[in-house]
Structures are given as C-alpha cells and as structure tokens.
Image (cartoon, rainbow, N blue to C red):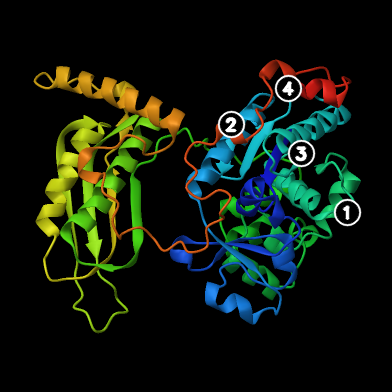
Amino acid sequence: MYALADCNNFFVSCERVFNPTLNNKPVVVLSNNDGCAIARSNEAKALGIPMGCPAFQIKNYTTEHVIMLSAQHVLYRDISNRIMQVLGEVAINLEVYSVDEAFFELPYDDDERNHKLLAQVVSKIYKYIGVPVSIGFAPTRTLAKIASHVAKKDPSNTDRVLGLTIQSDIDNILSRTKIDDIWGIGRRLNAKLLSRGIHYASDFVRLPKSFLQKIGNINLVRTQEELLGLDRVSINPVTIAHKSIMSSRTFGHVIQKRNEISDAVLTFAQACATQLRQEQSAALTVTVYVRGDHFRQDLPFYSNSCTVRMATHTSSAIEIVRHVLIAFNSIFREGFSYRKAGVMVSDIVSAKELQLDIFNGEQEVRHNRLMSAIDKINNRYGAKRIMLAPSINKGEWAPQQNHFNTKSKHLRFYSGMLPQYPSKSKLNAPLDQDEDDACEQ
C-alpha cells in the first residue's frame, strides 16, 4: 500500500508559518526577480489568478488587494527537510518526489490503522512545523496521488487523509477525475485524448492498450494499469546523484563590473560543490557561461561559455572554484553588459568509487576534512555562513526581491522559532494513545 503526502500551497504555507496575518488572505509567491506567480493561496486561486501569471498582470484579475511575496527557496527547502524527516520516522521506503511531495509505503495491512496513523502524522506536521499536509493512500502510486488531490480539495475531509482501497470508491473517484488530473498525462496527451472524446479517468481505463501505445508509449499503458490497481511505476529517490548539477541565476538588472559577475559565478560554483557533497559524489568537469540581455536593443549582446576538465574528480569547493575562475577569466569581455550567468559540474561519479591521486591524495584528504567542517557549521548556523574569500562580497547580481515577507526576511537560522517536531519514539506511539500525549515532548 502506497501513500502520497502533499503539502498544501507549500510556498504560501511556509510564509504563513512566520506571518499568521497572511492566513485567509489572497497571497501569491513570485518567482526569481519577482517575475510571475509560482504559488497561490486558495483565496488567490478563487480570484482567478492563474499559475505563471506575470506580477504586473495580477491586478487585472481582481480589485481586491493581493499580497505578493518574493520567493525564499532556502527557507522552503529547510521546512521541506523538516517535513520529510517527520514522514521518514513512520514511512517505509520514503521517496521524495519534489520539495512538497513524497511517496512512501505503509506499515499495516489494515486500512483503518493506516488511516489513523496518517491522520496523526498530518496533525503532528501541522502542530510542530505549521504546514498543512494532505495524504492519500491506495494500492498504487498513481491512485495515491489522485487520493491526495481529492483529500486536499474536499473541505469536508477534516483529517485531510483519504484511502482508495475499495473498488467501488475507486470507480466513483475515477468517474470524477479529469484526464489532465492524472499523474503522467501532460498537455499533449491530454489534447489527444480529449479530441477522441476521452474526458475522465473512467473512460481512460477502458481504452485498449494497443490504442494507448499508438498515441503515446509504454508509460501510458503503465499509467492505465496503475489506475486499475497494478503496481507499475517506480520513483527514483532524490538521494541518487545527478548526472550534472547546475547553479545559475538571472540578475536583477544588467551589470558590467567584472568583480560583480565573478562574485556571482563563484557563489554558484560553491553551491554546486555543496550539492555534490550532499549527494556523496564528485565531478570532473566544470562549465561556466555568461549571457547578456536579449531584450536590450540599446546594448551590444555577448554570450559565451567555457568548459574545464579538472585533474581528478572532486567535491572540494576550493578546487572547483579555482577551475571555475580559470574558465570565467577566459570568457569575460570588458565593455559588455551581462544579465545571466551560471556554473555546471558534470562527469559525476560516486565519491565512494574514487581513488586518491598518487600526487595530490594528501591534499584531497585535507580538503575533504575542511569541507566537512564548513558544511557542519553552515548546516548549524545557516547557509553561506562560511564561504571562500573570492565570493564574500555582495554585489548587484542578486535578483530583484522587492516583496519580502518582513516576518521571515533575512532568516538564515531559525530553528528556535519553530516548535520542535517529536522524536521517533513519540511518532511511533501506540495508535490508540491520546493525541496530546503522543505529541508531548
């Protein structure tokens, strides 16, 4: 039996943790440079504000005052990690699907016990972290995702948990689930199915497999089988290392100063190195790119990139920054204006598979110890507390963020501001124990 935990309006909910006055008000969280809407509260959705709506057009949808907030992804990631840690205390094979979603297997065969356990988890996450979560469980991940969606949308479902285990209930939900609400069916497939009169999931499950393979591929057939209760989809946990890692940003406005752009590039390099260490991997190749502004006709446009191969695989910020600086110096040109830059590390392997270089092995060991100490300090006291000297200056390359939530702006270490979530022993308290007793610290 699979379950899907889905945080409700996650970015908005994170902002409300620190500023409860945002509750019951239309709130929109904006993308980098305050460009467009990437999260909306239920009140904002009710006003008709669509996802991706440019910030300057939001006022066209309503005469009401809509609160717009600049995104704080470091904050959201930290709260997400807290939620996943709480889920991990009770979940079997936790599979983090995105920053606000996670699949996991349930420990019991009894639906009533599973429902009660999940209701307790939802309650604990809200009590100790402050973010509302909906959970659906079913025989397959695709059905669990539908169940979670229904649990989130149903106002009468007070515990925000829904199980789809009885066939009559599954048939009823599928008859009301639109094609574009099925996990794995995108816009193109949705258009193809709608053109053939397939509007609901109940219609989709009756289609011949040969027809599905003709308009899609084997994954479409697997989606159908998932809706029929057959386990066919697997999720790769986020702990699996990436083939490449990219850190980039569009600047708040065009900049020309060399030190401003190099500061941004070296900050991106350290972010890549940090992620490599988090994934216990190492990279061999670094790529740096810079780009001007396509839309500024009054400025000469310039774009270039450079790839450098290091002597050995590494996750040391010192080595990666050194080679990134070499690449950056080879492509930077004076007299041009730059709007975007980025760093990518590739040729990634597991750190456990590395062999030390016969000439630089001792240096690599020293770097690993230093990086480990830096990571521990940054994890405890906040991201970027310790950085390499070339990137300590804060310049004009930062994105435009003119709508910060004043209650959470500049927060880098705020563990004491959130209630402590329960220990594993408390989360695994007997199911018939009183809720207040089970949540006591």
Q: Quadrant of the N terminus?
A: top right
Question: Vertical placement of 364 versus 404: above or below?
Answer: above
Q: What amino acid does circle 4 point to?
A: Leu
Q: Position of residue 417 (x, y in %)?
A: 61, 36
Image quadrant in which you'd find residue 90: top right
In this image, 263 relative to 156: left or right? left
* Earlier-in-chain disc, 2 versus 3: 3
Residue indicated by mark 4: 427
What residue did someone put label 3 on?
137
Q: Determine which residue is flagged by label 2.
A: 416
- Mark 3 vs mark 1, CA separation in Å: 16 Å
Query: Label 2 is placed on what type of residue?
Result: Gly
Number of other residues with Cα within 10 Å of mark 3, as a class: few under 14, some 14 to 19, many 20 or more: many
Would you call the spot at circle 2 few (<14 residues within 10 Å), some (14-19), or many (20 or more)?
Answer: few
The image quarter in which residue 84 lies: top right
Badge 1: few (under 14), some or many (20 or more) residues near its Cα, within 10 Å?
few
Q: Are marks 4 and 2 in contact (CB under 8 Å)?
A: no
Q: Which mark is residue 375?
A: none
The amino acid at mark 3 is Phe
Horizontal and vertical percent position of residue 323: 16, 42
Q: Which residue is mark 1?
A: 172
Note whether residue 72 is visible.
yes
